[in-house]
Image (cartoon, rainbow, N blue to C red):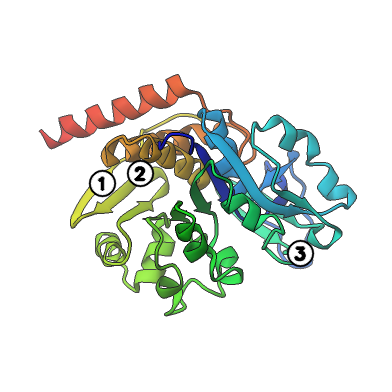
Amino acid sequence: MSAGRDLVLSIGRLYCDIVFRGLDAMPRLGEERFAESVAIVPGGGGFITAAHLAALGLRAGLLARIGTDPLSGTLAPALADSGVDLRWLERTPEAGPQPTVVMVQDGERAFLSRRAGSARPATLDAALADPAARHLHIAEFATLAEIPDLIETAKGAGLTVSLDPSWDDDWIRRPDLIERAAGADIFLPNAAEARAIAGCDDLDEAGSRLAGHFPVVVVKDGGNGARLFQRGNAFPLPAPEGGPVLDTTGAGDAFNAGFLAAWLAGRPSQQALAEGIACGTLSVRSVGGAGTRLDHTDVDTMSRNLLRSHDRIDA
């Protein structure tokens, strides 16, 4: 990284995730279901990515708003323990409560969320002007839609920018989504988002189309791994098989952290892809998007094994 510029900012709504696990079936209208366990944890891609970046040793700051209500207050210990720089976390009654109910059954999830107030923190301009700021990660397109000058302002301040569109029914198929995201250096959709935004079912074609608009495109495909599209080339890398899966919430955000940490460190894009897959894989071993504290050694070992396995398959 540039001397003196080591701060990665992550922006997105901060949710109070209420995660129910151990369901026999998802509830239907008029029915009540009971879960084996419940956990209340901080959620939202902005926080989850920042927490994993901090665990990987990067200086990560969260740009978000949080309410002053009792539900929002339950997040205080986890936020304080996350290692994330919270100087730019705006606390205001307007921003809460902002809950997400997460129901997990057989690895599949259903979400019910409430957005409260504006996504733009009053601290935004001060954070982007911080002389240490190097990169801005935008965790959801909905936040960018509310702050349409966000990419332009960040780039004007000398920051590189990444964007995870994060599925939003109001925006995902809008023809102007790509235009509004112009200027992002790294575009990080999952497979469903890539297909919807590019308007085609073939994942390689979707990635190639998106790569015509962004310098680096990474398409996350869950248990199938991920695909990198850059400078006219495509590089697929499968995920490792096996391993415990407790909660896949935030796996894509953990992937983002792994990829960004490697990319910002100047490592080759293929290695960054492997480190992203490793972080996403390791993150599902605990409840909550940031429940697993990523370890350098584990990430490095898994990513190296992934690349070796790919080389053997190609050979």
Q: Is residue 245 visible?
A: no
37 over 115 or under it: above or below: above
Classify mark 1: helix, strand or loop: strand
Spot occupied by residue 236 in the image (x, y as percentages of width and height): 26, 46
Q: Which mark is residue 116?
A: 3
Residue marked by disc 2: 225
Mark 1 and 2 residues: CB-CB less than 8 Å, in contact? yes
Quadrant housing residue 182 = bottom left
- Farthest left residue in view: 315
- Dot 3 or dot 2: first in sequence order is 3
Q: What is the spatial separation of the Cα atoms under label 3 and label 2, in whole angstroms?
A: 34 Å
- Dot 1 or dot 2: first in sequence order is 2
* Crowd band around label 3 with a 10 angstrom C-alpha radius: few (<14), some (14–19), many (20+): some
* Crowd band around label 1 with a 10 angstrom C-alpha radius: few (<14), some (14–19), many (20+): some
Q: Which mark is residue 236?
A: 1
265 left or right of 168?
A: left
Which residue is nearer to you in this view: 121 or 44?
Answer: 121
Give the residue type at disc 3: Ala
38 left or right of 265?
A: right
Spot occupied by residue 305 in the image (x, y as percentages of width and height): 30, 25
- Farthest top residue in view: 297
Give the residue type at disc 1: Pro
- Dot 3 or dot 1: first in sequence order is 3
